Amino acid sequence: MQLIDSHVHLNFEVFQQDLDLLQARWQQAGVTHLVHSCVEPGEFKSIQQVADRFPELSFAVGLHPLDAHKWENTTAREIRNLAKSDQRVVAIGETGLDYYKANNKEQQREVFLAQLSIAQDLNKPVIIHCRDAALELYSILKEFSTATSQPRGVMHCWGGTPEETQWFLDLGFYISFSGVVTFKNAKQIQESAKMVPGERLLIETDCPFLAPVPQRGKRNEPANVLYVAEFIAKLREVDVEILATQTTANAIKLFGLCNTTAQ
């Protein structure tokens, strides 16, 4: 059984002492490839260094909405140039909107639109973070599609209602679920995980955050994506190997991993 963890942050300090042990565990769990997200362009070198150690890792470059205040006149060019500088870059992001306690909504919107444009120009998918902003994010994507062309991408660590989920499915997006789906009170997320078509479903850890049950409260790691797969398989009443095969194929298709994923 092969699994792809479609969203990790392995360059964080919390992992630096035992990355080799993490790799042994994710390989044992069946994880054959990982997609490393990016919080800000300044991380790019450290992400490259992790990818140099682990050939099964691809990555993105972008600016997280919570860091939108760091956007400068040169940031768009920096993201574009970094994305073009390394063939292991498979996406732009993570980008999006986070309106939880936000006081810079307009700035977030501008930064998100700028990164959508970069992704379109480079023909790369976007990794989208969305918190307390589903309706506005949907509206932006819909308007962007009308003005230019339909962006490709994934709603990562998705926590929306089934109705919100359908909005983004209608726009052609993939939906990725993290360990949050295993939480006892995550009923609407579980309902969303049931309704996503198999060909649009992805799984992730978002490690080191949001460890799934039965690891909740501990540092999360890529091996734990197996728990996410097992839980969603039970929700959808399918064998976990079927779900693993489908989500792996989906990640390969979205991120263009055909030449980099272990077989």
Image: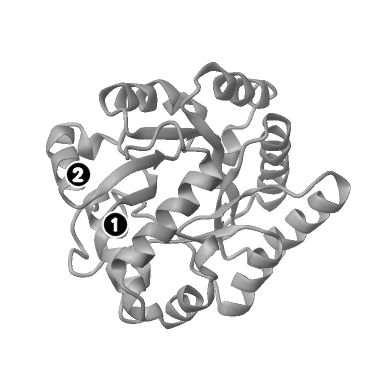
Residue at 80% in and 49% down = 144
Residue corresponding to mark 2: 27
Q: Give the percent coordinates (x, y) of residue 206.
A: 37, 51
What type is the residue that disc 1 sits on?
Val
Instruction: Check the picture and name the quadrant holding the N terminus.
Output: bottom left
Mark linked to residue 200: none
Q: How crowded is mark 2: few (under 14 residues within 10 Å), some or many (20 or more)?
A: some
Q: Give the percent coordinates (x, y) of residue 85.
A: 54, 16
Q: Residue 75's image quarter?
A: top right
Residue at 65% in and 48% down = 152
Residue at 36% in and 42% down = 34
Of 180 and 3, nearer the camera is 3
Of 84 and 164, nearer the camera is 84
Instruction: Check the picture and name the quadrant holding the C terminus.
Output: top left
Q: Can residue 133 be seen in this view?
A: yes
Q: Which colour scheme is used?
A: one colour
Residue corresponding to mark 1: 225
